[in-house]
Amino acid sequence: MNFNVAIVGPGRSKQGTGPFIARSFKQLGCDVQAIVSSSLSSANKAANDLKNEYAINCAAYESLEILLQNHSIDIVVISTPVDSHFQYLTTAIHAGCHVFCEKPLWWPNNELMTHHDVIRITSETSALVNACHENKVLLQLNTQWPYTLPTYYDLHPSLKSQSSIKSFTMWLSPQSHGNTMIIDTVSHLLSMLYALVGNGKINNIESNFHTANSNQDLEIQFDYLHAFGDTKASIKLTSSNSFPKPAAYAINGMRVDRHVELPNYLISLRSNDEQLPIEDPLVCSIKNFLSTIQSKASTDEVTLIDGMTHLAQIYLAATQH
């Protein structure tokens, strides 16, 4: 089935993923018809870049509402800064469009201060999910890291026989600083935990947020309680402007580092002296999204709601204690 796609946030500013998402949707047979940016001039520039680099011919808009009035769109991709996600999500869902959204799903403009703010985030996320059911559309996050797991197990085959995942650690290098690093990265850690052991509960959150300075890693750790036991989870963050960004993870202490070869963006995982290529996780994520639409499956409400609740709990505990 050929889907008509609109991209919100198609530019490359701050190392945005919009152009790569547009390219991948086209490669998978979709028609990227239109894009939305923060201004008409930036939208026109992004449209020209997509035409020149990927032969994507699309109309440019500065309003999603106006775009949807002029085009029959099946899928809206949201690849903007997170503080704008909620507005675009609401517009797209109520227009009857499926939504493919960058992580995290959304984030409030005001600072989280109390447990009541966490409850509000859970409630508003539940309302978004309910709107998806009412409008019969799929809402899915761009979740890429879990698609690296098959290659990880090829590098560490002994883990396949281990009965439990006692620890999981990620090392990431966001461009942001301070508390914004938590918003930008913790959803990646959570997506891996959900893929490895399923949904669960978070306890005993600790961080060095108030003692770390700009030259130190920000570290967060917690207990993740799930149906198979208790996993010690942690994330270590170092702000970086380099590209491609350093990234790694370890299961039960067995680490792999992501390696990206430019300019073709060939991705592989490396452990000690062994290195194996992986299929582009972005393409895998979009393939999964498209196949889920075609299967008429419902939005995964538990993962979306838990993901936002857990992110809010971790953010509050790390920044307020």
Image (spheres, helix red, strand yellow):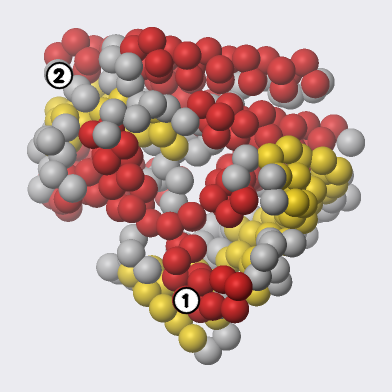
Closer to the chain start, of discs 1 and 2, is 2
Q: CA distance from mark 1 to mark 2?
A: 43 Å
Q: Quadrant of the C terminus?
A: top right
Pointer 1: residues within 10 angstroms few (<14), some, or many (20+)? few
Q: In the rendered structure, which amino acid carries the disc numbered 2?
A: Ser
Task: Tell me residue 136's x, y (percent).
Answer: 32, 17
**271, above or below 265, in the image:** below
Q: Which quadrant would the N terminus be assigned to in this image?
A: top left
In front here: 70 or 292? 292
Q: Please state which amino acid type lies under the numbered disc 1.
A: Asp
Query: Which residue is nearer to you in this view: 26 or 168?
Result: 168
Residue closest to the eye, 14 or 229: 229
Q: Residue at x 75, y 45 (%)?
A: 225
Is residue 9 in sight in this rendering? no
Q: Which residue is mark 1?
A: 154
Left or right of 1: which side holds 273?
right
Q: Secondary structure at mark 1?
A: helix
Residue beneath disc 2: 72
Check if mark 1's residue and mark 2's residue have beta carbons within 8 Å: no
Q: Secondary structure at mark 2?
A: loop
Does residue 206 lie above or below 110 as drawn? below
Q: Quadrant of residue 93?
A: top left
Q: Residues within 10 Å of mark 2 (few under 14, many from 20)?
A: some
